[in-house]
Image: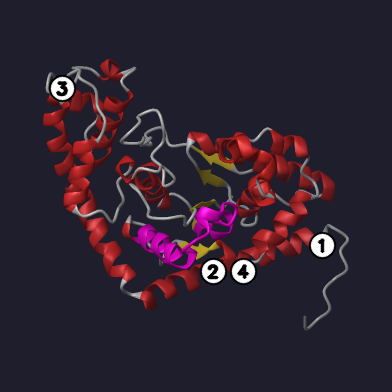
Amino acid sequence: MATRILSGIRPTGNIHLGNYLGAIKNWVSMADSIDETLFCIVDQHALTTAEDASNLYENTRLIAAAYVACGINPDKSYIFAQSHVPGHTELAWYFNCVTPLGWLNRMTQFKDKAGKNKEHANLGLYSYPVLMAADILLYKATHVPVGEDQKQHVELARDIAGAFNNYAKHEIFTLPEPVIPTQSARIMSLRDGTKKMSKSDISDYSRIHLTDDDDTLALKIRKAKTDMEPIPQVKEGLENRPEAKNLMGIYSAVSGKSIEQACLQFEGQPFSAFKSELTDALINHLEPIRRKLTLLLDDKDELDRIITRGATRANILSQESLSDVKSHLNLYPKPKGL
């Protein structure tokens, strides 16, 4: 059976270290072992929250450029914008008609995003897990690389696939497998080690953007929250020290050393000394990415070529899936020529 992966990032602002180390770096490592790889820029998902819907044009170009700068080969993988493939929203509607409200009521991320104002949240925010299922199943993806916090969405996609197959009385969709890398770095906020690094955090000092220059990066690391204890000899000594554990995890991810090796290397040192080494490791690792990202953002024709190539392939796969879906829904066939 041929394998295919689908994953994506919302174009809601500057791409940060957590996006790269927690997601894109793993996509790159998976690409050689998968038959076909598709990486979407999920711009329609960004429309669910007003603050994320601004600057979508520029941010879509930024995410496409970041994918390539971080190591995705645009001539082997397909990079495209979600809104360039109408099949996403069409399939989401068919899925809406077989998805019980109870399934959506259990989705934790809606509760987190809507907060206390869930009665005023828009329908798109509530139903976006169905659109996410359509994103995955439209391409009959066999594997979906996700973080632990996104596993619930892939499980819902599996449930919807099963429900739709039962409704259509035909095995149209295979059940995608979530892929959660065991060695994936979980990058947390530089201001609060108990929260994920996020674009939505009010403080710019909570995250490192891939576009940050060396001086900005160094300043953010100097200001990063730590504790008063020295670096322990063993990894277990970082437990219950979220900020310390986060910085050591970042160092491990960009230096190629395990956390155990890093603990032995810096044992007994204060974090003020360690931060200098971390800054150097980050600059060495990110500078080539930042340089390539800058070059790509200056080459609009190349970005257009990459996105057009991806959308062309995505639309072909989309139409194959939708043709199969609609043939089992008793819909009146579209007249020739339309």
Q: What element carries label 3?
A: helix
Q: Considering only order in the chain, which callout, 3 or 4, is on the residue closer to the N terminus?
A: 3
Q: Is mark 1 on a helix, strand or loop?
A: helix
Q: What residue type is labelled 4?
A: Ile
Marks 3 and 1, how far apart at CA: 62 Å
Residue stretch rendered in magenta on the structure:
39-68
Reply above or below: 78 against 17.
Answer: below
Q: Considering only order in the chain, which callout, 4 or 2, is on the residue closer to the N terminus?
A: 2
Residue 262 screen position, x and y as percent: 19, 28
Q: What residue type is labelled 2?
A: Ala
Q: Which amino acid does label 1 sit on?
A: Ser
Foreground residue among 283 and 112:
112
State the mark number for residue 327. Answer: 1
Marks 2 and 4, how far apart at CA: 9 Å
Q: What element carries label 4?
A: helix
The residue labelled by disc 2 is 311
| The quadrant where residue 263 appears | top left
Marks 1 and 4, how far apart at CA: 17 Å
Marks 2 and 3, how far apart at CA: 48 Å
| The quadrant where residue 120 appears | top right
Is residue 17 found inside the magenta-colored segment of the image? no
Q: Is residue 261 left or right of residue 88?
A: left
Residue found at x 35% / y 36%:
189
Marks 3/1 in contact by CB < 8 Å: the verdict is: no
Is residue 40 found inside the magenta-colored segment of the image? yes
Reply above or below: 278 against 334.
Answer: above
Q: Considering only order in the chain, which callout, 4 or 1, is on the residue closer to the N terminus?
A: 4
State the mark number for residue 316. Answer: 4
The residue labelled by disc 3 is 264
- Please state which of the two labelled residues, at mark 2 or mark 4, is closer to the viewer: 2
